[in-house]
Amino acid sequence: MASSKMISRKMIKLLSPTPPSLRCHKLSFMDHINLPLHSPCAFFYPKIPQNYSNKISQILENSLSKILSFYYPLAGKINNNYTYVDCNDTGAEYLNVRINCPMSQIINNPYNDAVGVVFPQDLPWSSSLNRSPLVVQLSHFDCGGIAVSACTSHTIFDGYCVSKFINDWASTARNMDFKPSPQFSASTFFPLPSETNLSSTLPTTHPSKRHVSRMYNFSSSNLTRLKDIVTKESHVKNPTRIEVASALVHKCGVAMSMEKSGIFKPTLMSHAMNLRPPIPLNTMGNATCIILTTTVTEDEVKLPHFVAKLQKDKQQLRDKLKDMKKDMMPLYTLELGKNAMNIIEKDTHDVYVCSGMTNTGLHKIDFGWGEPVRVTLATSNKNNFIFMDEQSGDGLNVLITLTKDDMLKFQSNKELLEFASPVVESTK
């Protein structure tokens, strides 16, 4: 098993100090009701050009220092009640680490869990209250390749903001004159109610060590095949690649559950929907709502039927939000979350959680030495599906996290393997 050795640890300060007028960054109600965890993503670069080999860390540090002047809440401290960030310019935590194995040993491992070595120990998906809202790790492999990982507080950023920040950081690394334009104004759209329980609204959860992850790839041609199946057997029009891929992994999850119990159990699947627009695209903070799709019969699990239900649920949510005052959206989102938690607690449904980081450019993040061969996240909670763009083409990668026993059943599903294949990259 790969192990790591710390080379250095430091705090990266802001190139330009935060003005006193921006010292207190008010968190929005959306921020407040989110799980206070570090969201972890990593980028693997197997071959570093000779002219970069000795200055990678300096490039990352200098560009991070500059970009933090624009993304200043990431260099502050979240208060205990999750109501504001003290933008005190403490800085972001930066670790330089050596990994005692070649990169191929990590990214060619059939289980994604092996990537944990490129993240700070015990940090992914853990509380962001007493750590820097941003923790970066540069990992050097024996083969000369590197990985750049970032753990970002979910209290401050949703997935959309993480992708904006990483893209802007990479742009700054390539051109120090680059000037991003993030707006930390989410609290003006989603203000905290004057009377609210200032304890954490939703429970903090930690992934069990029994959970494992595997990444699967849906090629563009296989996504087209799935879309054809859905449209020919239903009245569904223009299904998206995430709709058909999530319908298939949901169906495979149901098959896995029935193999264990021998009976069908109703399901609940959630999808995250970005609220930009209606709020401006450069708004930083949490701005998502969840779409809840349920099935109560085996017939509803069939791909055309499930996609039809999913599209209907998405449209109903859009219609609901269209005329809703923006300051009511967090309360509605919280209500949806509580409904889902009630179902989870009653254990009447198998629950699956979907989120997407597609169309964000994360698969092409270039700090100056080329694009990554792998972009991934750390293992999370069970029954979790995270969709990402594949490294080339128009396909999808999906990171699937299940219990170890469930994964053994899931990965042998013939229908899954007909349309998706385990991701295996070669650094040769």
Image (cartoon, rainbow, N blue to C red):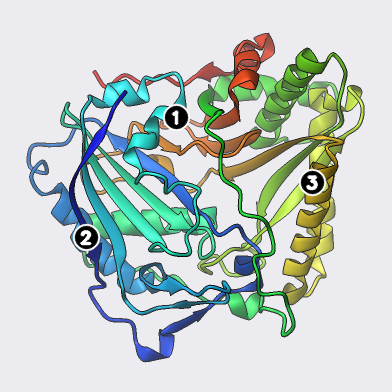
Q: Could you tell whether 115 is left or right of 189 in the image? A: left
Tell which residue pokes out farthest to the bottom in this image: 21
Residue in view at x 88 percent, y 28 percent: 300
Residue in view at x 51 percent, y 65 percent: 156
> Pointer 3: what residue?
292
Q: Amino acid at mark 2?
A: Lys
Q: 215 or 199: which is nearer to us?
A: 199
Residue in view at x 90 percent, y 22 percent: 299
Q: 353 or 305: which is nearer to us?
A: 353
Residue 385 location (% of width, % of height): 61, 35
Q: Is residue 424 above or below residue 170?
A: above
Q: Could you tell whether 69 is left or right of 381 in the image? A: left
> Pointer 2: what residue?
10
Mark 1 or mark 2, earlier in chain:
2
> Pointer 1: what residue?
113
Where disc 1 sits, the SS reads helix
Q: 3 or 263: which is nearer to us?
A: 3
Crowd around label 3: few <14 · some 14–19 · many ≥20 (10 Å): many
Q: Could you give the CA–CA distance between mark 1 and mark 2, rounded to whole angstroms?
A: 26 Å
Asked if the residues shown at circle 1 and circle 2 are in contact, with their CB atoms under 8 angstroms apart, the answer is no
Q: Amino acid at mark 1?
A: Asp
Q: Could you give the CA–CA distance between mark 3 and mark 2, rounded to whole angstroms?
A: 42 Å
Where disc 3 sits, the SS reads strand
Nearer the observer: mark 3 or 2; the answer is: 2
Residue 284 location (% of width, % of height): 51, 68
Mark 3 or mark 1, earlier in chain:
1
Q: Amino acid at mark 3?
A: Leu
Asked if the residues shown at circle 3 and circle 1 are in contact, with their CB atoms under 8 angstroms apart, the answer is no
What is the quadrant of the C terminus in the image? top left
